[in-house]
Amino acid sequence: MFYTNGARTFANDAAGPISAKAAHITITTPGTNVQLHQYGLALEANTQYQLSSKAYSNTWHDVSVSLQKHASPYTGYGLSGQVIDLTGSWQSYMVEFTTSGFTGTVNDGRLMFWIAPYDAAGDQ
């Protein structure tokens, strides 16, 4: 899911490093709430996970990544605001973290790539 309170285009028309159809976001008007997220993730408490992704920014603007409960009160699940220093070409990024903030198993995890406050008009 992609959300912004600014203006944007979102498509899957960009060729990625391992896929002909990668997500392609173009910011036309920056927002204060700009995020790409996936929800409904099942997680085990106190477990080490590894997040791998590939990305780039035509303006080298960063993004941060967090993992939290999908619904209010948005409890953190062990990964909070890890900044990914994007470059102007496709790069691989990896973040390791241990889940926390809950016990047992949850099925309401939300992995969120936070684009605000880094976004600017013309960013892709």
Image (tube, rainbow, N blue to C red):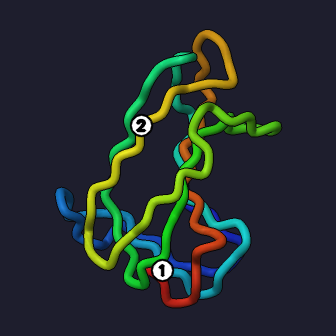
Most distant residue in the right direction: 73
Q: Nearer the viewer, residue 15 or 69?
A: 69
Quick check: 38 above or below 73?
A: below
Mark number displayed over residue 96: 2
The amino acid type of the residue labelled 1 equals Thr
Which part of the image, by quadrant, shows the N terminus? bottom right
- Which residue lies at the image location 60% right of the left edge and 51% below the top edge? 81
Left or right position of 6 against 89: right
Number of numbered discs: 2
The image position of residue 12, as x and y in percent, is 35, 66
Q: Secondary structure at mark 1?
A: strand
Q: Nearer the viewer, residue 52 or 4?
A: 52
Mark number displayed over residue 26: 1
Left or right position of 102 against 15: right
Q: Nearer the viewer, mark 2 or mark 1?
A: 2
Left or right position of 14 against 70: left
- Disc on the earlier residue, 2 or 1: 1
Q: Secondary structure at mark 2?
A: strand
Most distant residue in the top direction: 104
The image position of residue 10, as x and y in percent, is 48, 72
Q: Using the numbered discs, state the Cα–Cα distance from disc 2 to disc 1 in whole angstroms.
A: 28 Å
Left or right position of 56 against 117: left
The amino acid type of the residue labelled 2 equals Glu
Mark number displayed over residue 36: none
Which part of the image, by quadrant, shows the C terminus? bottom left
- Which residue lies at the image location 73% right of the left edge and 72% below the top edge? 32
Q: Nearer the viewer, residue 34 or 84?
A: 84
- Which residue lies at the image location 27% right of the left edge and 63% below the top edge? 91
The residue carrying pointer 1 sits among few (fewer than 14), some (14 to 19) or many (20 or more) residues within 10 Å by Cα, namely some
The image position of residue 19, as x and y in percent, is 20, 59
Quick check: 11 above or below 71?
A: below
